[in-house]
Image (tube, rainbow, N blue to C red):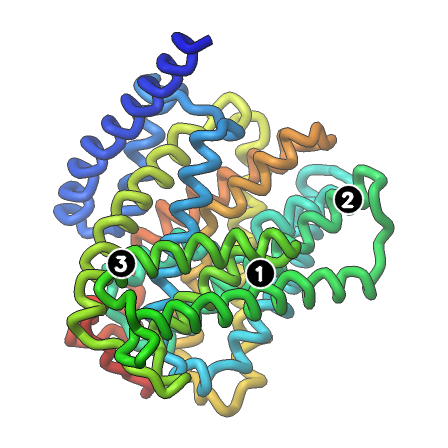
Amino acid sequence: MESHVMSVVQQNLYIITLVLIVGLIAIKLSEWIKIPDVAMFMIVGILLGPSLLNFIRIANDSVANQFIITLGSILILFEGGRAIHVSVLKKVWITISLLSVLGVIVTAAVVAITAFYLLHIPMLYALLLASVIASTDPATLIPVFKQITIREKVRQTVESESAFNDATGSILAFTLLAIIQGHAQLSVASSIWSFVREAGGGILVGTIIGFLGVLFTSEHNWGHLRKYSTIINLVVAISSYLLAGSIHSSGFMATFTAGLILGNPDLFRLHISEETNSPVYHFSESITLIMRKLIFILLGTQVDFRILKEFWVQGILIVLVFMFIARPLTVLACTLPDRKAKWKWNEIVFMFWVRETGVIPAALSGMIVAAGVKYSSEITSVTFIAILMTILIQASTTGYVAKKLGITIDEPNHGMKKAVDIK
């Protein structure tokens, strides 16, 4: 027994070491080719996975894989929240609110109808497939925007959407899964309550934990732990996720909210010094880079071409509708009513193009397979085709599209500076 445990530990250490080494090569290649590193990590993962070279083999439902995905998503989301400016959110909160709820529903409806006709599966299962890929992925978008300098209003709107709509997409997927398994009945009232509990509970927990983090690291009399700000930030990120989960709320929303609070201490008329913040920035840059490598290289290794080949034609057609019809309709439905934000057409068109799919949909599809749901092969195939196409096509060209649309800014924002462009 002890020998088996040591063997598993050594195997996981081998995988992590190999990922970190090839990840460095992938970073240099992404800089040379000038594409976001998450796209290159995905490509490297496909090459190293069982489908090709078979250097890395880790099951989607293994403890190690789930731990890496969960921890990585927590830290990336938390860091994304820290980079958000409340002053910008005040101007675009209507758009973000609509994208987080109405946007997911519009996307899911369009994709479900397409899947129903192309895959010839029952509408309930088509809706389940659509709900899995309906929300944008923060673990993909936030790293991409770290490498591409665009207007703060646009960047923070899309990043906030990717964090907040995770709850909507997850609630929709789990509700449909429960109905399919016979554990629940379709009810608008229960769905609304689930959303309020998950989203509201996550925001509440994140606000409370984030405030405690601000208090203990600020220049206030209670700031006795400011010397240990890096550890406090790590504890705040993980504990907000755990506490929200314990009350059946969205852990990812709690983590993002906690990061938002810690990044905006002036909300409580508190101040965190540059000396306290500096080690946090350096640590978060390194740890989120490591987690990006692990998440996306491992995600690439789990692409199973044997499953994909059966539904690849239908999958590509569904994802094309997803990218070029569902997303534009979603953005138009959520930005045009928001007169306060004063969206320009080049900004709206750019948001058409940024709807990457990644870690969260992969995790949801894995749960559906584990639950033994009918048509899980179709759901898994379309999910991974969506991940591959949106990351390799959209994430790789985000910088080019932003430049062509004229929404890039001259001065890069490396996180230490918080210059806000809300034109």
Residue drawn at x 45%, y 63% as measured from the top left: 256
User: Which x, y percent locates residue 318?
Assistant: 58, 46
Quadrant occupied by the C terminus: bottom left
Mark carried by residue 87? none
Residue drawn at x 31%, y 64% as measured from the top left: 401
Q: Between residue 340 and residue 34, name the one nearer to us.
A: 340
Q: Nearer the viewer, mark 2 or mark 1?
A: 2
Pointer 3 and pointer 1: residues touching (CB < 8 Å)? no
Amino acid at circle 2: Ala
As displayed, is residue 346 above or below residue 149?
A: below
Q: Residues within 10 Å of mark 3 (few under 14, many from 20)?
A: many
Mark carried by residue 230? 3
Mark carried by residue 178? 2
Q: Circle 1 — which element?
A: helix
**Is residue 31 at least partly visible in the picture?**
yes
User: For the residues marked 2 and 1, what is the alpha-carbon distance in whole angstroms?
Assistant: 25 Å
Q: Nearer the viewer, mark 3 or mark 2?
A: 3
* Mark nearer the N terminus (3 vs 2): 2
* Mark nearer the N terminus (2 vs 1): 2
User: Which x, y percent locates residue 85?
Assistant: 36, 78
Pointer 3 and pointer 2: residues touching (CB < 8 Å)? no
User: For the residues marked 3 and 1, what is the alpha-carbon distance in whole angstroms?
Assistant: 41 Å
Q: Residues within 10 Å of mark 2 (few under 14, many from 20)?
A: few
**Is residue 349 at least partly visible in the picture?**
no
Amino acid at circle 1: Ala
Pointer 2 and pointer 1: residues touching (CB < 8 Å)? no
